[in-house]
Image (tube, rainbow, N blue to C red):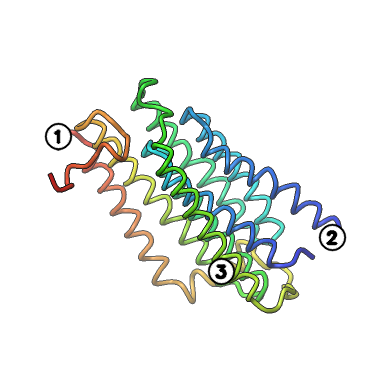
Amino acid sequence: MSDKAEMVLFWVFALPLIASAAGVLVARNPVHAAMSLVAAFFFLAGIYVLLTAHLIAFLQVIVYAGAIMVLFLFVIMLLSLSDAELGFDRMSALKVAGIAGALAVLAVVVMAIQATSGQGMAQVPEGYGTVRAVGRVLFTQYLLPFEATSVLLLVAIVGAVVVSKQRI
Amino acid sequence: MVPVTHYLALGAILFALGIAGVLVKRNAIIVFMSIELMLNAANLTFLAFARQTGSPSGHAIAFFVIAVAAAEAAVGLAIVIAVYRSRGTVAVDEVDGLRDP
């Protein structure tokens, strides 16, 4: 892919990504916020493909946009919040402080990015970021964390059931 | 070739939006969505650096981040349901049972 086409694709994914991520914050209805977040995850998957991270892009769509967001929507509908409980944000002084804090973090990170050296991308081998390449790393170098992740998921399942069940 | 700083700046913007959501919003579910946004920003940074150095380790870390995010969402939303059952609200500043009287 030519450099120019790649740059165009980057902006095609990046601008809607920022817009839909901001939509999560400005939406009054939680369902609209969840839908905006699903859109953001899809655009982020496109960015991942540009980074030749194909496996992670697929996982992003399947796990995040699929499983996790369905969980969010289930909880939103399960709670069936009344209009009085929705939409009212914090008072404006705290809101200004929150936005100022976020901007301060953004400024610090941007300054750190500007201090990094070397903007070029490495030449990656054929098959970089595919299931085969990532799986090879996952099952050799990161085998112990991988197995620990399965224990973590088991603990999360048991914890979610224990916490949300009324009587056991 | 898109320079790596573009991806890093995009991750920084996403992270700042997530922080703003955690600090500003009252609805606990929206706060959780903002946390997911911040986790995704970290993932994007990992993948950008992995692409810059050509190492596959960043992909493995991103995989673990996705797994941990799934676990966090399950437990966190269970806590939201439990709080709603006992307090009748999901507004984060009305759940202040541990505050000094």
When asked about the image quadrant of residue A84, the answer is top left
Q: Is residue A123 above or below residue A93?
A: below
> Given contact means CB atoms under 8 Å apart, are the residues at marks 2 and 3 in contact?
no
- Residue that label 3 marks: B58
Q: How many marks?
A: 3
Tell me which amino acid carries mark 3. Answer: Gly
Mark 3 and mark 1, same subunit? no
Locate residue A90 relative to residue B38 in the image: left or right: left
- The residue lying at 48 percent from left, 76 percent from top is A141
Find disc 1 in the rendering and name its residue: A167
**Res B52 label:** none
Q: Would you identify the image quadrant in which residue A89 lies? A: top left
Q: CA distance from mark 3 to mark 1?
A: 42 Å
Instruction: Please state the chain letter of the residue tagged with numbered disc 3 in the rendered image.
Output: B
Q: Position of residue B98 (x, y in %)?
A: 17, 47
Q: Is residue A90 above or below residue B61?
A: above
Residue in the picture at 70% in, 46% down: A15
**Residue that sits furthest to the front in the current view:** A93
- For marks 1 and 2, the one nearer the N-term is 2
Crowding at dot 2, Cα within 10 Å, few <14 / some 14-19 / many 20+, comes out as few
Left/right of residue A103 with respect to residue A80 in the rendered view: right
Q: Position of residue A164 (x, y in %)?
A: 25, 38
Amino acid identity at mark 2: Met
